[in-house]
Image: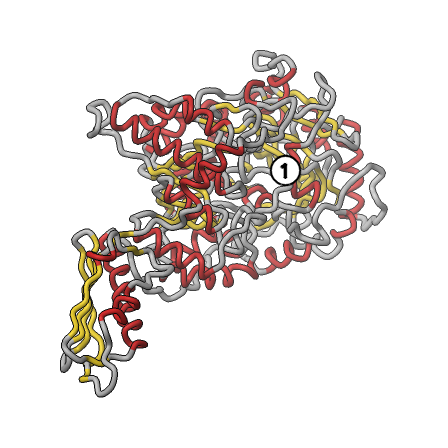
Amino acid sequence: MISENTKNITKPELLAPAGNIESFYAVLKAGADAVYMAGSRFGARAYADNFSDEELIACIRYAHLLNKKIYLTVNTLVRNNEMSDLVLFLEPLYEAGLDGVIVQDIGLLKVLGERFPRLLLHASTQLSVTGKYGAEYLKELGVSRIVPARELSLPEIEAIKDTGVEVECFIHGAMCYSYSGACLFSSVLGGRSGNRGRCAQPCRLPYSTEYKEECYPLSLKDMSTIGILDRLINAGIDSFKIEGRMKKSEYAAGVTSVYRKAIDGYLKTGSLNVSEDDLNTLKNLYIRSEVSDGYYNKRNGAEMVSITSPSYSGADEKLLSKVRETYIDSGKTKLNISVFASFIEGEEAYATATYEGLSVSVKGQMVEHALGRPIEEGDVLKSFKKLGNTPFAYGNPETDLSVYLSESPYYPLKEINELRRNLLSLLEDKIIESNGFDVKRELTEAKETRGERSKKSVNGKIAVSVITEAQLKTAIEEDTVSRIYVSETLLTCLKNIYEYFGKGKELYAALGYIRRSDSEMLRSLIVSFLKDGSLKGVLVRNIEDLQFFKSIKSEGTSFEIAGDYGFYAWNNSSIKEFSVCCDTLGLPLELSSKVQNALAESNDSVSFEKMVYGRYPLMQSANCIYKTGLNCKKKAADKLHFTYLKDRTDRKIPVLADCARCHNTLYNSVPLSLYKFMADDKESLTYRLDFTDETPEETERVLKYYKEIIFDNKTDAPAWEYTTGFEKKSCE
C-alpha cells in the first residue's frame, strides 16, 4: 500500500555499482533496480575487476529475467584510434539488449546515437552538467538521462529535470573535491588521467596551507544522504546512484539493502524512518571516518572536508559476515518454475515450462520404440533436474517436475539434454520479453558524415588569457598579441572597462570554467558587451555556456565562440560536433604534440589554439580553501584572491578564489613551456599564453620571450622553472 502523501511521487530507481560478478549478483539480491558496470576497457574505473564481454552478456540477460536494467560505463575520453574498437566492443552488448551507456565523450555520444539508435544515452557526471542549457545541449545529442555535477543544490537539479530529461544523482559514497571531469591533478602529477579512469587521488594527500601545516584540505568526506532521502524523493530525482565500483561486494550489497528499505518505507508510509541498525550498517561499511550529505543543502564549507584524515575507518567484521551470508554466499536469485515432459512412441518429444503464468513449449525428435533398453522416468528426471548455472530452480522437485512416458520409448540421452536446454532458453526469452526488454536487437548500418564549415585560419597570431588588470594592461601594450581573453570576473570588476576597448586587440570574455545559476548575472553583462560590439567573442569552457551563447548567436548577435581546451576534443567526432558552434577550439592538454597536430591537420571545420605557456588548471571546485580554514572573502571588495597550498615536496600550488562566483581553481606549481616543440606547427596554429598569478614584470618577460621564439626563431630555454607536460607522450 502506498501512502496518500507519496502516491503521486514516481518511485526512483535504485542504481547500484558492481565491480565484479560477485557484486553484481549481490546488489540485485539486495534490491537494486539497476546496476552500472564496466567492461575490460573504456570505463572510468580502470583498476576495478570489471567484466569480460561474455560476463557482460550473461549479466544483461540475467538482469532482464529479474526485470532489472544494466547500464555500461564507457565514461572515458576516446582517442581517434580507439573509436572503432569501442563500437565493435559495444555491438554484441547492444544486440544482447544492453539498456544504456554512461558517456563522457561528446564525440562518442554522437557516434553511439547513430550506430545504436535503441540504446539509451546517459551523460556522465564527468560532463559537469550544471543547468538547463547544458541539459538542452545534450538532449539535442540524443541524451535521455543526465548525471549532473555532484555540487548542485536541489533547486538546480529540479531546473535540469524541467527540461524533460531524466536525472540520476549520487546518494552515497566517495566525493571528489573537483567537479568531475574538470580535474587534471592526477594526470599532471603522475600521468594517470582521471578522464581515462586512472585517477591516483592526489586530493587525498596532505598539503600545508596558510592556516594549517600537514592537513587534508582537498579530501571531502564521504556522502551519505540517508537522512534527507525524503527530500530527494520529493524532488523527483529519477535514479539514486550509489558510488563504489572499486569497493568490496559487502559494501555494495549492504548499502543497497539499507537504501532499498528506506525508499520503500518512505513511499509506503509517507515518513522517513531509518533505524539505528541501518545507520550503523552504513557507518561500518568502508566509509570515511566522517560523512556529510553532500552539496544538496549547502554550497560549500569546512564541515564537508576531512581535514585531519582521508582514510577509511574500516568495517565491522560481524556485519561483513552477515551481509555476505545474506546477499553473497547464496549466489544468484533463482526463479521457481514447473516443467512437464512427454515421450510417447511415434510422436515428437515434447516439453513445457511455466513461470508465473508464462508458458513455453518445445518439440524434439520423433520418439522411437525401444529395441533394447527403453528410457526410464529416472533418466528424464535426472536430465531435467540439471538446472546448473541457469537462473531457474524447482520450488518442489517432487511436484514441479513431472514426466509422462509411453510403454517402451527410446530417445537418446544427448537429445533429452538438448530438449531441456532449448526449453529453458526459450523460457528465458519469454520472461525477458514479458518484462519489456529486447532478446535480440538488430544493428543499423554505420554512417560517415562530414562537416560543412570551411576552416578559418588565424596563423601566426598570439592569444593570451589574463586574470588581473595588471596582466591585461601589459598584454594590451604588446603589439604581437592579437587576442586577449579577459576573465569574466575581471571584466565585471574593472572600474573603467571601456578604456580597454578599441586598442587594436580582439577582446574576448573568458567565461567561468563552471556556470552555476547564481552567476548568471555575470553572463548577462557579457551579452551586453557582445551586443554593443565591445567584445569580439567569448571563450567558452562548459556546455552550459556553449548552449546559452549558441542561442544568443542564433538570435542575430554577431560574435565569435572559442571553445577552451577543457572541452576535451580528443577525436574527430568531438571536433566535428563542437565546430557546429565554435569558431576556434583549444587542443587537448593531455595529448601529445604529435596527436594534437594530427587532430588539427585532419579537421578543416574549425581553427585551433595551442597552449604553449601557462599553468595547467588542476581542479575546479565549488569548495573553497579560504572558507575551509581562513576567513571567507565573499563580501570583500576585491573578488579575485590567490592563496597557496604546499605539497610534500614544498612545491607551491596556486589557488585562485573567485569570490564573485564562489569558485576555486587550483593551478599547477610550475607553468607549461613548449619552446622546444613549436617549430613544426607555428604556421597552422594560434599560440596561447595563459597568465594566472604573474606580476606585470613577469607577464612582460614571458610575452617578450615568446615573441622571440615565434617570430625570431629563438631556441633558448626559458629562465624560469617549467614543465613540457604531455608534448612527448599522451597521458595514460
The residue carrying pointer 1 sits among few (fewer than 14), some (14 to 19) or many (20 or more) residues within 10 Å by Cα, namely: few
Q: Quadrant of residue 412?
A: bottom left
Residue 613, percent from left and from top: 72, 40
Q: Is residue 225 above or below residue 169?
A: above
Residue 694, percent from left and from top: 74, 29
Instruction: Say if residue 387 shows up in the picture.
Output: yes
Q: Nearer the viewer, residue 464 or 437?
A: 437
Residue 35, percent from left and from top: 40, 45
Instruction: Say if residue 552 shows up in the picture.
Output: no
Q: Is residue 502 left or right of residue 704?
A: left
Q: How many marks?
A: 1
Residue 557, percent from left and from top: 43, 36
Disc 1 residue type (three-letter): Gln
Q: Is residue 97 left or right of residue 339?
A: right
Residue at the image position 17 percent from the left and 77 percent from the top? 348
Q: Is residue 234 left or right of residue 636?
A: left
Q: How is the image coloured?
A: secondary structure
- Determine whether the residue tagged by mark 1 lies in a helix, strand or loop: loop
Residue at the image position 39 percent from the left and 30 percent from the top? 157
Work out which residue is located at the far bottom of the displayed protein and give it.
371
Residue occupied by mark 1: 201
Q: Nearer the viewer, residue 455 or 611?
A: 611
Residue at the image position 47 percent from the left and 34 percent from the top? 149
Quadrant holding the N terminus: top left
